[in-house]
Image (tube, helix red, strand yellow):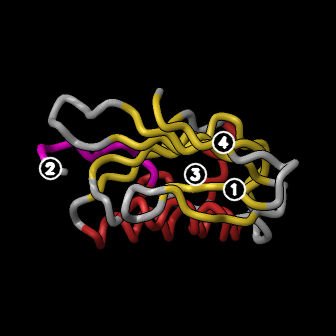
Amino acid sequence: MENQVVFSPHLTSRNAINANGEAGHLTTTGALTYEVEKAENDQYGNRVTIVKCHGKVTSETGWELREAVKPLLALGGRIIINLGDVNYLDSSGLGALVGLKLSAIKQGYCILEFANVTPRILELLRVSNLAQVFSSSERPSPRN
């Protein structure tokens, strides 16, 4: 993948992709790390951005994920949040993910998807009746 930005807990400030597609500045607490990658456009020509999350998405770190993803929503296309390496998600972290999903729906020209949702997170979604929100029922359509 090209244009990869890696966020590491050993650094206090990093570059992130902002709404103009340029590198921006972001500070994190270190309990959550993530990588933002621009992937090749999908079959419909949509811009594809992958956000790979690692660690904990909690009340202390959910804002970091929101701050990284929200500017990407304005760019349109598909944003895939990979949760495969998330080892803990609390109710605030879940709220951050739901908020991002709702923001993407409100934007109208952005598809936000969740990939590699762990069994533990799936169970949390099932218990909270939010599994439908996180399902990949959306079909990508031609748009940028």
Q: Amino acid at mark 2?
A: Arg
Q: Secondary structure at mark 2?
A: loop
Residue 74 forms part of the magenta stretch: no
Q: Report the mark closest to the observer, 2 or 3.
A: 2
Gap between marks 4 and 1 measured at Cα: 8 Å
Looking at the image, do the residues carrying marks 4 and 1 touch, with CB atoms under 8 Å apart? yes
Q: Is residue 46 left or right of residue 58?
A: left
Gap between marks 4 and 3 measured at Cα: 31 Å
Instruction: Give how far across and how far down residue 31 sits, in percent.
Output: 84, 55
Q: Amino acid at mark 1?
A: Arg
Q: Is residue 63 above or below residue 12?
A: below
Label 4 crowd bin: few (<14), some (14–19), many (20+), radius 10 Å: some
The magenta region covers 134-142
Q: Earlier in the sequence, mark 1 or mark 2?
A: 1
**Residue receiving disc 2:** 143
Label 3 crowd bin: few (<14), some (14–19), many (20+), radius 10 Å: few
